[in-house]
Image (cartoon, helix red, strand yellow):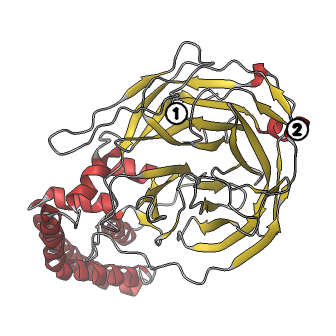
Amino acid sequence: MKTRLKPVALLLFSFISMLCLTQVISADVLDAPDPANNIPQVNAGNVLKDYTQKNLNVIDNTTPKGNMDRKYIERTIDENDPGTVESYSTTPDSTQQTTLQTKLYLPDGFNVTNYQHGNFQSVTLDDSGNMYFIESNGSDTNLGVIVKYNLADLNKLGAGSDPMIVWNAFNYFNPYTDEGVQHNQQYEDAYEQLKAPNADLKKIKSEVQNLQSTTSKKDAAKANRQKLSALENQLETDQKQIKRIKQQNPDLFKYAAVAQAAQLSPQVDIGHGQTLSFNPQNKHLYIVEDNTLTDLKTRDQNNTVLEMTTDSLKPLRQYNFKMYHGDSGNLQLHTLTFDKQGNAYWGRKNGLGYMFFYGRLDQHDVQFQAAPTYFKNRGGSPNQGVSYNPANDRLYYVTDDILTSIPTQSVRDGSFTANDIHYTAFTSKRECESLTFDQQGYGYQLMLWPAEILKSSTPLD
């Protein structure tokens, strides 16, 4: 049996719905995050089970060739040369046919510091549809910020049909340009104009909620209707005033909404920046602070890894550990990813081939060991990153214009053949910085320059 709501209750719900849809803005387009200080430390000592090359198996695989010479096609974006939708199809010798197509252009920076120059090094997705980027201040600083966007919210703001909207929003409010300074001032002026009607709306919401709590009382119903009628007139007046202010400069509020949908971490040590990863088991982010691109120079030095929350993007703890190899080596992480069980993986070049390591990286257990089997042939030159696909439980290593994958179980037990290796190769001649996956297995590739996210047309194998 369906119960009909009383007219007074219907009015209340209608008012509350209208109030929830009213955007309340803040004085600053983007709030600068607080610095990260006094981070708890986890000192784990040597965490690597040593290995010798001769005790590892090798798969003599035949791989498609990616970009081996590190010569890239580059271009810049400006208002007179907007970004186009790029599209790159796989080569015929790939194990699947798919296309990478522009999903989103990233801005020259998220307006945190004047170091910004469109240098993005990592992208990762969590299991709730949030995407995280690392913006690097440059190799001379080893500093950067992590930026979070909910993709569904971003699509509602226009990213679903306009891949330039984030680039445009942060360019519009760029405080390091004269035009950006002017737009920030316009936003502050609008904020002052909206103070009074927004405060009135907040007051109305409170009054409506108070009336809602008394609607069940018969003796209050008539008085409530009279008060609601007055509130309705007041609400209409405030909404007209807000609408009139916003219509004076629609781009100002459109781009402000896009900018304010971003969440920023504090400035942190991001190292080279190519290791941002999401651990599905504990729902945390990790970033390796690898400030050199080699192994560690001495046995006294540590790998350092920062663990962060996904909700506040605040650092939780920092891990310090060594990975002794042989009599003098001390390996350093430059890649990192996690599977659904919280197992950690990283990879490194092995001559012309590639090898993985696996283990754990959490508060109570830090350990790694070499995978029993490695690839003889890599297919591309740089070691750009590793990534995990939750839809097919496969591990990928990324090098320019080629993605190579095997099942995670095969990484741990070494039980794979050349036929188990999948290749997704392109001829984009772009620098392929990072790869991440949604829960359906679609791949999102970060490419430079310009910085953009490209999405695969099909789930990757």
Left or right for 123, reference 170: right
Asked whether residue 226 appears in the rendered view, the answer is no
Residue occupying image coordinates x 22% and y 76%: 229
Foreground residue among 64 and 314: 64
Check residue 413 in the rendering and tell me which mark sits there, or answer none: 2
Residue 276 in the image, given as x and y percentages of width and height = 57, 55
Q: Secondary structure at mark 1?
A: loop
x, y percentage for residue 67?
A: 50, 27
| Quadrant position of the C terminus in the picture | top right
The quadrant of the picture occupied by the N terminus is: bottom right
At a point 66% along the width and 66% down the height, the residue shown is: 304
Q: As rendered, which of 120 and 161 lies closer to the eye? A: 120
Residue 345 in percent (x, y) is at 73, 48
Residue found 22% across the figure and 63% down from its top: 173
Q: Are dots 2 and 1 in contact, CB under 8 Å?
A: no
Residue 160: image quadrant is: top left
The part of the image, by quadrant, that contains residue 390 is top right
Q: Amino acid at mark 2?
A: Asp
Name the residue beneath numbered marker 1.
400
Of residues 322 and 223, the one drawn nearer to the viewer in this rendering:
322
Examine the rendered structure and indicate whether residue 32 appears above or below residue 247: below
